[in-house]
């Protein structure tokens, strides 16, 4: 069986919504979100790579982007990384079989 060749885009919510509007029948959009904003803040802080200011900026951006999640075909909550990866893979494989 020949596999379809298709681009995979990792883009911001506005770009994803635009792609979806342009290609509604041939695009798959998946929004991956943290279990909560509080958990996101904990994860980012535990990495030790953010200043307090950059941490707050990232949290604010995430909150804003999460408000667009209902525009996506699928929503995956990244509560468990392995499960989130497996669910994402299933969605993509199913989409490519269409």
Image (cartoon, rainbow, N blue to C red):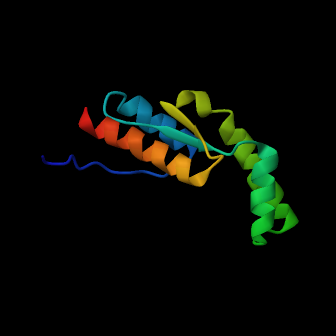
Q: Nearer the viewer, residue 80 or 92?
A: 80
In percent of the image, x 33 and y 42: which residue is there?
Answer: 93
Q: Residue 53, image x and y in percent?
A: 85, 62
In percent of the image, x 43 and y 51: which residue is there?
Answer: 9
Q: Residue 1, image x and y in percent?
A: 12, 46
Q: Residue 56, image x and y in percent?
A: 83, 55
In the displayed structure image, the side of residue 62 where residue 7 appears, left or right:
left
Q: Residue 5, image x and y in percent?
A: 23, 50
Residue placed farthest to the bottom in the image?
49
Visible in this render: residue 11?
A: no
Visible in this render: residue 17?
A: yes
Q: Is residue 17 above or below residue 50?
A: above
Residue placed farthest to the right in the image?
52
Q: Is residue 80 above or below residue 63?
A: below
| Quarter assignment of residue 96 | top left
Q: Is residue 43 above or below residue 68?
A: below
In the displayed structure image, the side of residue 60 where residue 17 appears, left or right:
left
Q: Is residue 57 above or below residue 49?
A: above
Q: Nearer the viewer, residue 64 or 1?
A: 1
In percent of the image, x 78 and y 45: which residue is there?
Answer: 37
The C terminus lies in quadrant: top left
């Amino acid at each position: 069986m020949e596999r379809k060749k298709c681009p995979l885009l990792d883009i911001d919510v506005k770009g994803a919504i635009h792609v979806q509007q342009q290609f509604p029948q041939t695009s798959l959009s998946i929004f991956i979100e943290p279990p909560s904003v509080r958990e996101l803040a904990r994860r980012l802080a535990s990495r030790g790579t953010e200043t307090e200011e950059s941490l707050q900026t990232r949290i604010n951006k995430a909150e804003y982007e999460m408000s667009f999640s209902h525009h996506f075909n699928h929503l995956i909550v990244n509560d468990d990384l392995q499960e989130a990866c497996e669910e994402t893979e299933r969605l993509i494989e199913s989409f490519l079989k269409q």
